[in-house]
Amino acid sequence: MPKKDAAEKLFKSTLVHQCSHCLSVYDEKTGEPANGFLAGTLFKNLPPHYCCELCEAPKEDFVPIDSSKLLLQTV
């Protein structure tokens, strides 16, 4: 069953936060180092003035979503 284990690791669900306007994603695992938010920075710990780096929507317009539903590819 090694193939099943590999598939489970590939599609393991994690919670990310998605902008409800442009659908960009804030992932706590990677953060936004270019904006001063290091990997591991929890979404709840982002400052109140945090906004989407793409469309500038406010923090409250992000929704938590299971990353496995996004069909993201690792780069």
Image: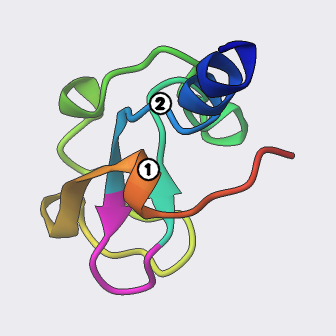
Callout 2 crowding tier (Cα within 10 Å): few <14, some 14–19, many ≥20: few
In x, y percent, where is residue 66? 30, 48
Q: Is residue 46 above or below residue 67?
A: above
Task: Tell me the quarter of the image containing the N terminus.
Answer: top right
Is label 2 in a helix, a strand or a loop?
loop
Residue situated furthest front in the rendering: 1
Where does label 1 land, which residue?
A: 68
Q: Which residue lies at the image location 35% right of the left edge and 62% below the top edge? A: 18
Q: Quadrant of residue 5?
A: top right
Q: How many marks?
A: 2
Q: Position of residue 33 (x, y in %)?
A: 68, 31
- Nearest the viewer among 2 and 63 is 2
Q: Which residues are magenta?
A: 18-23
User: For the residue labelled by badge 1, is the local secondary structure a helix, a strand or a loop?
Assistant: helix
The structure residue drawn at horizontal position 61% and vertical position 28%, both measured from the top left corner, is: 30
- Magenta segment includes 19: yes
- Label 1 or label 2, whichever comes before in sequence order: 2
The spot of residue 21 in percent (x, y) is: 33, 86
Residue topped by disc 2: 12
Amino acid type at image mark 1 = Ser
Asked which quadrant contains residue 14, the reply is top left
Q: Is residue 34 above or below residue 23?
A: above
